Image (tube, rainbow, N blue to C red):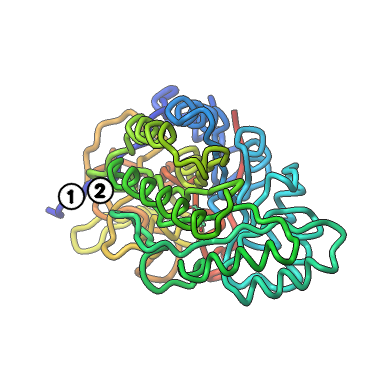
Amino acid sequence: MTKVKPVGPIPIGYEALDGELSIGGFKASILVAQHGSPLFVYSQSHLNRRMDKLRSAMPRELDIHYAMKANPFEPLLSHMIGLVDGIDIASGGELAIALQAGASAEKISFAGPGKRDQELKLAIDAGVTINIESPTECDRALFIGAAAKTRPKFAVRVNPDFDLKGSGMKMGGGAKPFGMDIELVAPTVKRIMAANAEWHGFHIFAGSQALEADSIIETQAHTLDLAFRLSSEIGQPPNHVNLGGGFGIPYFPNDEAVDIEKVGAALKAQFSKLPKIMSQTQFAIELGRYLVGEAGVYLTQIVDRKESQGQTFLVTDGGLHHQLAASGNFGTVIRRNYPAVIASHYTAEATETVSIVGCLCTPLDRLSDQAAMPKANVGDIVAIFCAGAYGATASPANFLGQGPAKEIFVE
Ligand SMILES: *Cc1c(COP(=O)(O)O)cnc(C)c1O
């Protein structure tokens, strides 16, 4: 007998139709019959529900931005543009996609280390806010901005002196390629103002994928305090402070969803006692996976069922070239199972232990390891959840000549 390993929690809101998983009102088998396999399916109603829940938990005056690197699929992005207050981009390529999808330039902010001159120029000409990540980037941006038709808008990205505890990916605290160290911030802001560019405020991002409300609350308090210290040093109120984000989603067994009401209540309390220098400041958070991660499902069809030394393998036509993170090869130390089901037998009881693998000729290509599943055969469909963020675009689609999966946006 093989040891059964648990799978992650299935996100709420995924119902059954005739015993099958349904997404946006369509059965998995119908979606695959119409669009082929493998297939990413993103659900609009899921996005709307998530956004409603977040808005009602957060302070009314807080802006919510979408960090589009989580999922830039155009129909999804267009929909998100209508739901959020800002779009955060991290490359000239994303700028083009965001504008194409209907984002207005005033609502776009551009972060990321290593912005090329050409990207800075495109962003300044478009009227996008640039989050300046170093004094030398500031020099380049001011030089390019001086020749531009519009007055450039620059915020300063700060490398905070703390990090988001329990965060899956730390992006602050200690030596980092992101943002600038605290002592460089005030001199840089003064140079921006002296050059008659618009100083938009601060961007302070301390980490990603945190599930503990208390960690997020503590980080937000530290972030507000840091923004206050820097504003006092500069002697000018910031128009805008981006407080970062970092709200995670449950991927693995025992992960629990962020207590968003608790985070929102704590932020409301913080906002009620802001120091005078920030009393007119507009605050924002920027989220990627929290907004879109659970709205996506990856469907892949079983092409072979085989036994090896007492273990059963379900071999699918998908794999890590579309879902690198689910295979455990994107920022995880120990491989654990993402939420996965046999979508074509969604409501059936688990009767066997199987490993679900991809079609790539590498042992890394494992979508679910020794999981308890209902009996499945060739032609059945596997669903991997939490596929709405860092799936299609954060996976090596060209590996082994496979190519990208189709993506669709449904009700
Ligand atoms: C990647 C990134 C985000 C989004 O992170 P999620 O974990 O998807 O919420 C937000 N802000 C910045 C600066 C980022 O680099």
Could you tell me which secondary element the residue under label 1 belongs to?
A: loop
Q: Amino acid at mark 2?
A: Ala
Quadrant of the drawing holding the C terminus: top right
The CB of the residue at mark 2 lies under 8 Å from ligand 1: no
Q: Nearer the viewer, residue 15 or 116?
A: 116
User: Dot 2, crowdedness within 10 Å: few (<14), some or many (≥20)?
Assistant: many
Q: Give coordinates of residue 279: x percent, y percent.
A: 52, 38
- Rendered view: 30 above or below 367: above
Which residue matches tag 1? 4
Residue plotted at (60% across, 62% down)? 403
Residue plotted at (51% across, 66% down)? 179
* Residue 255 seen in render: yes
Q: Nearer the viewer, residue 367 or 145?
A: 145
Q: Give coordinates of residue 160: x percent, y percent.
A: 42, 61
Q: Amino acid at mark 1?
A: Val
Which residue matches tag 2? 371
Farthest-out residue, bottom: 136
Q: Give coordinates of residue 249: x percent, y percent.
A: 38, 43
Residue plotted at (22% across, 46% down)? 6
**Label drawn at residue 390:** none
Could you tell me which secondary element the residue under label 2 belongs to?
A: strand
